[in-house]
Image (cartoon, rainbow, N blue to C red):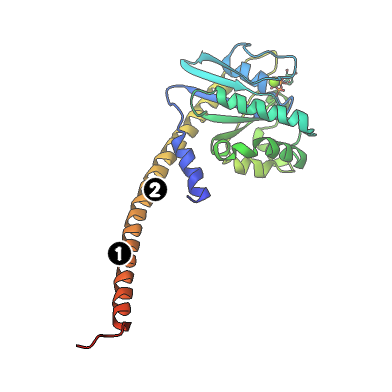
Amino acid sequence: MEPEFFTLFLAAALEPNRSSVVLVLLGGRGSGKTRAGNTILGTRVFQEGRPTTQSSCRMTSVLGREVTVVDTPGWPIVQSDASSNKVFQEICQGLALCQSEPHAYLLALPITSSFGYEEWQAMEAHLWSFQATVWPRAMVLFTHADQLGALSIQEHLGRQQGVLQPLLERCGYRYHILACSSSSFPLTQVQELLVNVYNMSEVNARATQEIRRGMLCWLRAGEKRSGKEMMRHHARRIVEGVMEMSAMPRGKE
Ligand SMILES: Nc1nc2c(ncn2[C@@H]2O[C@H](COP(=O)(O)OP(=O)(O)O)[C@@H](O)[C@H]2O)c(=O)[nH]1
Ligand SMILES: [Mg+2]
């Protein structure tokens, strides 16, 4: 099977459960994942105030819907083998905690710091093994959005240099903002985030159907192709047989 086809096959096979929402938080250390998780779930279920060292999964009902959030440890920007391996293992652990394929992978990025080449490399090192499943369902989650002041997110993005644009491109230009200051709870932003995630999973579900249809056509075409190849093979064998017979010394009639 060709690798690209295999990736599509995986994406189609791992369809999320549509009756609930499962979100996985990923990102660098201190990017605001744990705070975002608590904000989305509307309660302090993940421990804040210290770096997250283990992945954990929490579920609550948000706006009438069952929402599950998986919080993961952040990856270090300057990598050492030991710490990177530990984070990588915990990300694997976090993905294993999901009962079904997550609806969205939220890539936390604080708007207060820029996303440069080093950050890109750290992200690549930790997500490389999951790229087939992560990128089709990834969304950049801009945290610390309360620090934007009078600036709109579009204006902020327009001012950014570095590799933020390629990252957004990779995420299909899906992004969302979350202002998790300790003084206010951004209910509207959480609502919008869940709507965005729902819309993305609807688009993905339609794409999945298309992939399934495509796979069926491909398999049927394959059957026909192999049927034709078989016929060609038999025809070749008959021709070869005839030629062999005609080359044989003939006995006296
Ligand atoms: N003002 C503000 N602070 C935030 C926001 N999100 C996170 N923080 C703070 O940033 C620090 C790191 O956040 P945390 O969620 O622990 O990051 P993590 O390592 O990615 O889980 C903490 O001190 C948080 O209180 C935000 O949206 N606004
Ligand atoms: Mg954390």
Farthest front residue in view: 252
Farthest top residue in view: 44
Q: Is residue 203 above or below residue 73?
A: below
Badge 1, how many Cα within 10 Å: few under 14, some, many 20+? few
| Amino acid on which disc 1 is placed | Met
Q: State if disc 1 and disc 2 touch (CB < 8 Å).
A: no
**Would you name the residue on which mark 1 appears?**
231
Q: Is residue 150 visible?
A: no
Q: Is residue 59 left or right of residue 85?
A: left
Query: Which image quadrant for residue 76?
Result: top right
Q: Look at 45% across and 39% down and name the residue there.
A: 12
Element type at mark 1: helix
Q: Of residues 185 and 109, which is closer to you in this image?
A: 109
Query: Which image quadrant for residue 172?
Result: top right
Q: Look at 28% across and 77% down and name the residue there.
A: 242
Element type at mark 2: helix
Answer with the quadrant where ligand 2 appears in the image. Answer: top right
Q: Look at 64% across and 24% down and name the residue there.
A: 178
| Amino acid on which disc 2 is placed | Gly
Q: Is residue 235 visible?
A: yes
